[in-house]
Amino acid sequence: MARLDGIFAQDRPEAQVVALTGKGPRTFGDLARGAAAVAGRARAGGRWLLACEDPFAFAAGFLGLVLAGCAPVLPPNLLPGTLGALEADGLLRDADLADPSDNLPPSRPLGDGPVEFWTSGSTGSPKRVLRRFQDLVREVEVLEGLFGPLPAPVASTVPHLHIYGCLFRVFWPLATGQIFLSETCGDPARFLAAMGERPVLVSSPAHLARLPRLLPIAGLDLPAVFSSGGALEREDALAWRAAAPGGVVEVYGSTESGGIAWRNPGPDADSSRWTPFPDMSLAAAADGALLLSSPRVGPAGLRMEDAVALGADGRFALLGRLDRVVKIEEKRVSLPQVEAALKAHPLVRDAAVVLLEGRRRMLGAAIVLAGPADLEDPAVRRALGERLGAHLAASLEGPALPRRWRFLPELPRDARGKLRAGDLAALFAAAGNA
């Protein structure tokens, strides 16, 4: 099995195409010479901010930094304010990869070293997560062993700077000789253009929910679809079987852990449970939190803030975030439970709730309706809030009932399909809606 750390030790033809970019095909020789140029420029032991928009340039820069003994620093996004706030010894942009070396990298395996991910997290505050290059190498091996060789080029709707996109979109195909498409295909026009390759699709729940509403997906005949970044609604997973006969493979994980488990939702209710990756050992803490043991998370193991129910067969069900339980009027309120109750109403397509702090703690609910409504009319919005509140009151106590409502065309998800509490709270900072 090919290994990511052995990419320059393999006898791979320089002319082999590894990526399709907006400037045309890029070859293994382009990648290797780009990495060699970066390695010649970087000083060993430094931290380099990797701010490349093009995933191919990102890959060459990343491997060049590892080759030089430097730590790649992956920002949460490429906004100027974000990049300016992250201190590093050097900065690599796409233009820095425009002048490749005349030489190839040494024909030997890459060493280990730190890799620094920055993730905005649920609150919007940047958070540093330190991993090792060998963690990524091991995970690529696990993916290849678990799901088999990638059967087609890889297209993606998710960015490459976060661990899911980094691994599934770039390093897995790169390590195993498959092509990846550099252009992100999150909007309908780019998505349709990418589908001409009949690719493996690497996506997120937000994109997989939205795309079928914007364009026909039946008959795309995709060989595989992967999703991560949150739970995919069962009806969305089933809808994608019209585009991918094998259905959607959902991956559960985090920046700290990498991939933990997978499932392939189907008509059978049992398919909603998760199967651990083969190098993961699981246990449950006294409060139900998932405890991980794996070579990829270090000797101390890792506690996830997700409650689980472990089955005798080794599979498990996710029961919700432990850190999304809040106290209102001395009552513990589970935000995932409120969201699930809202989504069960036929008027609601998507919903999110957030704790609003002030003189009185209360919940705010952001709602995406399943059908049209005159949301410019305050009376309509008020009636919708009352109707949904009455629906919740049938199963939830008073403190769990949202006191403020926002009705939106879409929830404010980021490029990975994540919802941040700060973005949700900002919806309620302005007057208006309900």
Image: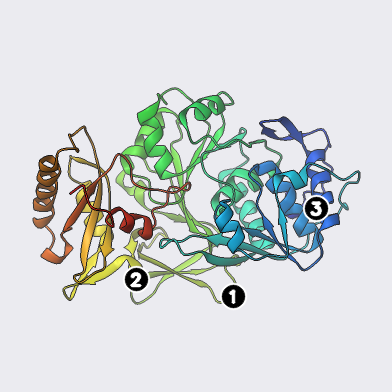
Residue type at numbered disc 1? Pro
Q: Which residue matches tag 2? A: 288
| Residue 75, visible in the rendered structure | no
| Residue 185: percent from left, percent from top | 53, 34
Q: Nearer the viewer, mark 3 or mark 2?
A: 3
Residue type at numbered disc 2? Gly
Residue type at numbered disc 3? Val
Q: Earlier in the sequence, mark 2 or mark 1?
A: 2
Left or right side of 141 for 239? left
Rendered position, 330 above or below 259: below
Residue projecting furthest to the front:
431
Q: CA distance from mark 2 to mark 1?
A: 21 Å
| Residue 131: percent from left, percent from top | 62, 65
Residue situated in front as seen by the camera: 180 or 365: 365
Q: CA distance from mark 3 to mark 2?
A: 46 Å
Residue situated in front as seen by the camera: 20 or 227: 20
Q: Which residue matches tag 1? A: 299
